[in-house]
Amino acid sequence: MQINLLHRPAQALAQVWLEPNESIVAESGAMVGMTTNVQMQTQSGGLMKGLKRMFGGESFFRNTFTAHNGNGELLLAHALSGDMSVLEMTQHGYFLQSSAFIASSPTVNIETKVGGFRGFFSGAGVFVLKAVSQGPGQVLVGGFGGIQELMCDGNIVIDTGHLVAWDATLTYTVGKSGAGWIASYLSGEGLVCHFKGQGRIWIQTRNPVEYGRSVGSQLPPRG
Amino acid sequence: MDPQQQQLVPAAPAGAEAPAYRDNSAQASIPHEITHGPAFAMLRVDLPPGQVVIAEAGAMVARHTGVAMDVKMNAGKDPGFFGMLKAIVIALIRKVVGGETFFVNHFSASQGGSVWIAPTMSGQVLHRRMNGETITLSTGAFLCSAGDVDMSLKFGGFRALFAREGAFFLEVSGRGDLWFTSYGGIEAIDVNGTYIVDNGHLVGYEGALTFDIRSAGGGLMGMVASGEGLVCEFKGQGRVYIQSRNHSSLLSWLRPLVGG
């Protein structure tokens, strides 16, 4: 499998080349186009797994695309304007912000995890995905705006709304941004993720929830 | 000058080289980098020990753990009691007219460290080294500042109250670094004479410019029929910054599509 990213960075489109009988698992709704020899199968992986995904902010179903009778091409896109990144699987795997997931190799196991902080008001950071695999594989992630890779060398604090993915070698806690709850509320920073250890973190340069609130608060309520 | 300040700035001994802090214009900008522009720009400031970056509330993306964040009311430098009172009143007005939040975050690092800052909307971030000039920004265009930069709120005139944008402006002056932001790309227009800019597309201006807010088509009827709303007519010599997108247009495009 080879993934080529087109139209970066503002409107990235992933061009996936599948070898005969090779598959890729994609988030429902991500498919833009494909050659006719690529077949799509919809799976929930069981009711509980599907429900768990739904609570994690993803869709109930996930689609598997397989190339039959020769090579196949598949185009995938994210819902928001922005960049994409291909993460090569490592021994420890990755944590993903649930809405950043677009697709992964079938060898990669994507699990929904409780993000470590039960903040009902946060809009982000309640659930995260963990991507692990035995062998090699790839995960395709998408961001709102640009994607920047940061090295965590000890300590870093990141707004939960700007997180895309991070190495599972890092330990993290989700908490308030300032010294106290009042200061954190006034600071407008919401919840932040405190990272410790050594590893890479991918952030998105725009915060989808903040953007949605800023525009949405000035629109009429849904009828 | 009070005696304490005199102690902090000793006279240079005769024959010695003038210390760098005496000449503010030669002072280098705080180390920083703007990436991911023009569509989704983000700013990274590498804070030297003792320096402070003041950013719009909610604009922080990430920071090193050693960088301290203190939330403060946006009252300008040493406001005193009445200054604070004024800040509260202004803050309430800004809240009502849909400007920014009235709190700012102060970032500082005793050991040095980086802070990453980004605006909410898609767009560019521009850096401006301030050497004593004054630049006037639309509310919402301010992202952050460093150094001896002061801000005050300016009333755009009674006519401007009819428009969402342009009722208030932020007057930024002093010496230091200023970063401002736009929805869409930023275009700098050098004006010598007159120039008309749509209110919603105005990011800011500087130089010897005066402006008048009026309806584009002339009168109330022209304002409604042309769809251009209010415009700023600039006169004089200076630079006007405009943005290639505007909030009101986005909202009026979305409004009929929501709900239904």
Image (cartoon, helix red, strand yellow):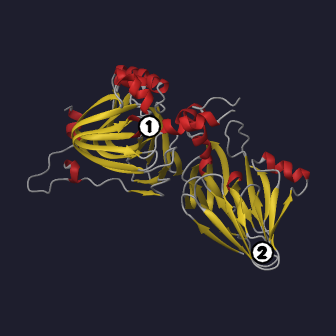
Q: Quadrant of the N terminus of chain A?
A: bottom right
Instruction: Answer yes or no: is residue B87 visible.
Output: no
Q: Give the left or right position of residue B19, taking residue B169 as reference.
A: left
* Amino acid at dot 2: Gly
Question: Where residue A6 sits in the image (x, y, percent)?
Answer: 59, 67
Query: Looking at numbered disc 1 in the image, what kind of residue is underneath it?
Result: Gly
Residue that mark 2 sits on: A135
Q: Position of residue B94 (x, y in %)?
A: 45, 27
- Choose top left, top right, bottom left or bottom right for residue A142: bottom right
Q: Residue at x 33, y 23 (%)?
A: B157
Q: Number of marks in the image?
A: 2
- Residue wearing tag 1: B140
Q: How many other residues sit within 10 Å of disc 2, few (<14), some (14-19) or many (≥20)?
A: few
| Front label number (1 vs 2) | 1
Secondary element under disc 2, as helix, strand or loop, is: loop
- Residue B188 lies, in percent from the top left, at 32, 49
Residue drawn at (72%, 43%) of the image = A117
Marked residue chain, label 2: A
* Residue found at x 83% / y 49%: A52
Q: Residues within 10 Å of mark 1 (few under 14, many from 20)?
A: many
The foreground one among B113 and B101 is: B101
Q: Quadrant of the C terminus of chain A?
A: top right
